[in-house]
Image (cartoon, rainbow, N blue to C red):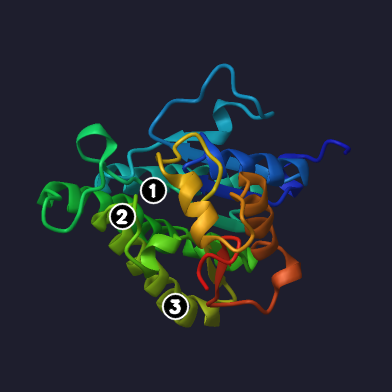
Amino acid sequence: MPNTPNAEKKTLILTGASRGIGHATVKRFASAGWRVITCSRHPFPENCPWEMGPEDHIQVDLADPQHTAGAIGEMRERLKAQGSRLNALVNNAGISPKGIGGSRLGAIETPLEDWQHVFQVNFFAPIMLARGLIAELEAAKGAVVNVTSIAGGRVHPFAGAAYATSKAALASLTREMAADFGPRAIRVNAISPGEIDTAILSPGTERLVHEQIPLRRLGEPEEVAKAIYFLCTEQSSYVHGAELHIDGGQHV
């Protein structure tokens, strides 16, 4: 693919880009010629496997509202190279605290500070980013994709109560955002992954695959990335306010 100047590229801002679904999403968009601006708690890694530099990475602690607000200002500054246009925002970052030995934290034993921490990252940060970048999204008739979870619709054997309820709230937020952002020609959708083959699978997942997933296999991060790409491109130009299940039929 010929090199395209940044000013002419479509641009994605992606949170939670360092591993799993986020890592695969970076590669999918970059291979299509997009500029990808990644955001995470960590600085840009020197051995980063994709072709980008520190100028396309923003270190931000999404658990800190003030730090998030400052990062939004930096994002807007960096988007000036694209005429202050943002084609896609993917809210992929998420945290799921565990108990002793990686045990599930239910509604009773989850400390209040954990609830607040999880909701700040998983729920409040996505709406802060979307509202903070609304002018740039509107200029590009861009798209927002919120990454929810199958855990948001049922009690999950591994995902804790704070994570599950934050993802359920994010699914509802997607509906509200679709109603409010749509008149500005900004499409807002969600993807709801099930059991995806990443480095953070919980013990017992193999049994769950056999008993609950009709396709009888885990999903691949690349399969999720392709769905995200679909929702950010013209192929889905009339898809708005939807939550796309990517779970091998587990939701049925």
**Between 82 and 63, which is closer to the camera in this rendering?**
63
Residue 213 screen position, x and y as percent = 55, 60
> Dot 3 lies on which element?
helix
* Residue, disc 1: 94
Q: Report the residue at 25% width, 32% height from top.
A: 101
For the question of whether residue 90 can be seen, the reply is no
Label 2: few (<14), some (14–19) or many (≥20) C-alpha neighbours in 10 Å: many
Rendered position, 43 above or below 187: above
Whether pointer 1 and pointer 2 mark residues with C-beta atoms closer than 8 Å, the reply is: yes
Residue 133 screen position, x and y as percent = 47, 58
The Cα–Cα distance between marks 2 and 3, rounded to whole angstroms, is 19 Å
Front of the two marks 2 and 3: 2
Q: Amino acid at mark 2?
A: Tyr
Rendered position, 51 above or below 191: above
Q: Amino acid at mark 3?
A: Arg
**Between 67 and 187, which is closer to the camera in this rendering?**
187
* Residue, disc 2: 163
- Pointer 2 or 3: first along the chain: 2
- Pointer 3 or 1: first along the chain: 1
Please tell me in which quadrant of the rendered image residue 1 appears. Answer: top right
> Dot 1 lies on which element?
loop
Q: Report the residue at 58% width, 38% height from top.
A: 23
**Between 140 and 108, which is closer to the camera in this rendering?**
108
Please give the label number shown on residue 175.
Answer: 3
Left or right: 106 in relation to 224:
left
Residue 67 screen position, x and y as percent = 30, 41
- Pointer 1 or 2: first along the chain: 1
The Cα–Cα distance between marks 3 and 1, rounded to whole angstroms, is 19 Å
Label 3: few (<14), some (14–19) or many (≥20) C-alpha neighbours in 10 Å: some
Q: Report the residue at 28% width, 44% height from top.
A: 63
